[in-house]
Image (cartoon, rainbow, N blue to C red):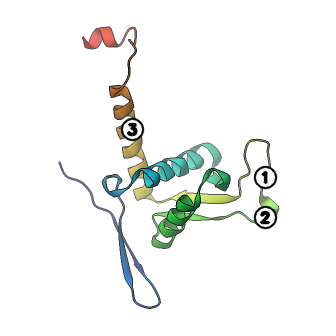
């Protein structure tokens, strides 16, 4: 099986190069979860993010991904923050094409993992597969 390896290189002012391999196989559980949260924010809320739903590790990962261009991530201007009872959108995210691809792959993989653990009979579907 061929796996596409997506590399992002960050060159700092001190000429330190940092290479991030950005694909689902190299992401830990926290990174996978963050990527899917960002994908949901992009699809359901136009990229608006409620940072209360993120922990310190998520924020650090988001900033790192922003630095290398895997996603664009930042704060919403305070005057534009909309406060509703369930969400306070105070950040924004824009996914790169690679981030969209990896998020889709993780959605499919997660579905396969969850379906394999089902303990129900899906009428009209499982009978056909048997």
Residue 110 marker: 3
Circle 3/circle 2 CB separation < 8 Å: no
Gap between marks 3 and 2, in whole Å?
36 Å
Q: Quadrant of residue 109?
A: top left
Q: From mark 3 to mark 1, how far is it between C-alphas? A: 32 Å
Residue sitting at x 77%, y 57%: 81
Sequence-wise first label, 3 or 1: 1
Q: Position of residue 3 (x, y in %)?
A: 24, 54
Foreground mark, 3 or 2, reads 3
Q: Which mark is residue 82?
A: 1
Quadrant in which the C terminus is drawn? top left
Instruction: Tell me the SS state at disc 1.
Output: loop
In the rendered view, does 130 fall on the left or right side of 115? left
Label for residue 119?
Answer: none
Is 123 positioned to the left or the right of 84 in the image? left
Neighbours of disc 1 within 10 Å: few (<14), some (14-19), many (20+): few
Query: In 3D space, how far apart are the residues under numbered discs 2 and 1 (Cα atoms)?
Result: 9 Å
* Vertical side of 60 occupied by 82: above or below: above
Q: Please tell me which residue is depicted at 64% across the width and 53% down the height of the picture.
A: 49
Residue under pointer 2: 78
Q: Could you say where residue 93 lies in the image, as x and y percent from the top left?
A: 58, 58
């Amino acid at each position: 099986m061929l796996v596409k390896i997506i590399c992002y290189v960050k060159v700092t002012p001190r000429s330190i190069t940092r290479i991030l391999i950005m694909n689902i196989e190299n992401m830990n559980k926290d990174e996978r979860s963050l990527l899917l949260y960002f994908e949901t924010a992009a699809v359901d809320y136009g990229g608006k993010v409620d940072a209360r739903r993120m922990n310190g590790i998520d924020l650090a990962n988001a900033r790192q991904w922003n630095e290398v261009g895997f996603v664009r991530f930042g704060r919403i201007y305070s005057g534009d923050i909309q406060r509703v009872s369930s969400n306070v959108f105070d950040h924004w995210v824009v996914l790169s094409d690679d981030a969209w691809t990896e998020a889709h792959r993780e959605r499919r993989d997660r579905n396969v993992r969850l379906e394999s653990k089902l303990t129900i009979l899906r009428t009209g579907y499982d009978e056909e597969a048997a």
